[in-house]
Amino acid sequence: MEIGNSQPKDHTISHENQQVSQQKIMLFSIGPVQEFIAQARKTRDLWFGSHVLSEISKAAARQLVEVHKARMIFPYLNQEMLEQGVDNLIVANKVVAIVNTSNPKQVALDVRRAVTLKWLNYAKDAKEHLGTSIIGPMWDRQVKDFVEFYAVWCTLHHEDQYSETLKKAEQLMSARKTLRDFKPNEPADLLGDPKSSLDGGRESVLKLKKNGEYQRLGIKPSEYLDSISLVKRVSNRTLEEKRNFRSVCQVAFRQFTDALAQEQHQNLREQANSYIKEIVSKLKSMGMEQNKLNKFDLENAYDFFYPNRIEEAIIELMPAVRAYQMLEDNVHIQLTDTFTEKLNNLLANTSMRPTSYYALLVGDGDHMGDCLRNMKSIKQHQEFTRKLSDFASAVDTIVTEKCSGQMIYSGGDDLMAILPLHHCLKAARSIQQAFTSQMNAAVPEHIRRPTLSIGVTIVHMVEPLEQSLKLARAAEKLAKQKRNELAVHFQKRSGSEEMRVSLPFEPDPVKSIVQLQLLYKKGYISSSFAYDLRKLHTEYLQLEQVGSSIPDNELLPLLELEIRRLLLKKKTEGVPKEKVSGFVLRKIMTIFVGLSSAGESQQQPLSMLNRLAEQSILAITLKKVGETDGTYD
């Protein structure tokens, strides 16, 4: 058994003859992961962080297949796939391969060089684009030691011993990661150099007097960024394949454009198009970037429908050669005032508002480790990995093509995406169904199949990204308490309203929520009805806690009467009583009774009432916040 580590000068522990070519199970871990991805102010930075890690991990896998003829376990990859092209293959930061070699340490060092070179190419492109606006020596110092690379290996004496050998290799990897590399400190150029706004462990490499050069890249004058953060920030200008990345503003705005496409909003749509034409005409007359303005329409002029986004959008449209002078002349401030007034006039006579909220969705597989440990053969592991890759591709299609969202990352069972509010639940359901389908195909019947837990947080677009990620992870953690659940968290930016609910995927909660939204849209139920259901649940729960519980067979018909009473009490004006006590009541009771089998066991009536209340609140909240930004009931 051998263990190799990340540093070329470190010694290798060996108890075997290195000259004999043997099959080795080799594990590689590439990072840093969470801190690199999470250190971001914009969601594009967030996406590019995960993209870079995927690409450098892919470089490791490619090197193993092309040069060392490895059999790949994670990710599923072979020479035929490489020849066909793997641009869309998403690779997690863990790479596992079986390599026939007499010198595994040299293989590890070779893979490490491929990984480092891939990263340095990204850094080089960003540095060339930023030109003289950065401190060169400090940049080089920060990027050269950024990649964390760990490698371990064990000899695979016989393929029947694959599972046991892999377990030993994973134990070695855990042991290696407990060690820390202490690198010599290279001090900054000047004592007191400002620290990076996103990573306090690194200094900013931006020259303070060059802010006019880099402000057009979306870097605010108040931001101080290190080299790693800048590689992510300028990715939209350095990537060879120009990607149409949707910002949170564009994703949130999609609900408004979908609403304007409806016939009843034709007049407002025409006014919105006229507003955009006025913007384009004015900006062209001021000498802004013509190429971008020529593409402006209702779909991509989203920034100009949010007062707090207009100024930044104008700055990014400034031509490079004139940006500094325009900023000095306060052109952006004058234009912002003009466009804000026009926007207020446009929205003055309608309750519709482009929502400032979007959905941040995160998901993680349940029981994945147990499932993999119970797989004994190489073939089973490879098939499992192949299905995970298929799932990652399916998720990207669901999010970007079917639900008008933006994929941040999808590495196997771990995923993150941003979505418009009116599509977020549909996306969650489709993602969970896709995962279930792939696991049913990949996992033998005698092994417990993994499930997927999804957390969704409804976030205001001006909420700091770091805080939004924390809320999303908290929602995911709530979903994983019972597993295979959908958890949703919403906190209005004003702090006046909070909602936190976790619902099992069986029976389908999204179907019920959509039905409740239709009832709300037609005026058959109200938000006060939903919150009174929650209050009713609390009252009966308190009775149970003081020992005044009612048997289930008596409680269920009693709760049905209570629901009918609340429906009639809270019915909206103009809705006939007969309609509520007939059609609406039947719809609500169908949903209520269907909740009896929620999860893995039969539910008690009070649990059913609680789920009905929370689903009603969730349905109405998403509808209100999505269509009127929460300003109208």
Image (cartoon, rainbow, N blue to C red):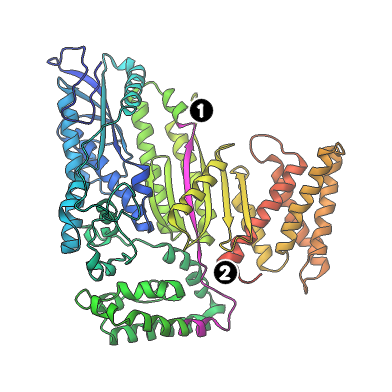
The quarter of the rendered structure image containing the N terminus is top left
Mark 2 crowdedness (10 Å alpha carbons): few <14, some 14-19, many ≥20: many
* Residue found at the far front of this picture: 191
Q: Which residue is mark 2?
A: 627
Task: Confirm whether the magenta stretch covers residue 357.
Answer: yes
User: In the rendering, at what x and y percent does residue 153 appear?
Assistant: 26, 22
In the rendered structure, which amino acid carries the disc numbered 1? Answer: Arg
In the image, residue 146 lies at what x, y percent? 24, 43
Query: Is disc 2 placed on a helix, strand or loop?
Result: helix
Badge 1 element:
loop
Residue 311 location, quadrant? bottom left
Q: Is residue 581 left or right of residue 218?
A: right
Nearer to me, 301 or 139: 139
Given the image, on which type of amino acid does mark 2 rest?
Glu
Q: List x then y, in percent, for residue 455.
A: 52, 47
Residue 429 in view: no
Q: Which residue is mark 1?
A: 448
Give the magenta-colored segment's residue range. Answer: 342-368
Residue beneath the point at 20% across and 33% down: 64
- Is 558 colored magenta in this rendering? no
Q: Is residue 416 visible?
A: yes
Image coords of residue 168 (percent x, y): 34, 19
Front residue of 441 and 146:
146
Q: Residue at x 86, y 36 (%)?
A: 547
Q: Is residue 139 above or below residue 372?
A: below
- Determine whether 202 is above or below 374 in the image: below
- Disc 1 versus disc 2: nearer the observer: 2
Q: Nearer the viewer, residue 76 or 37?
A: 37
188 vs 602, nearest the viewer: 188
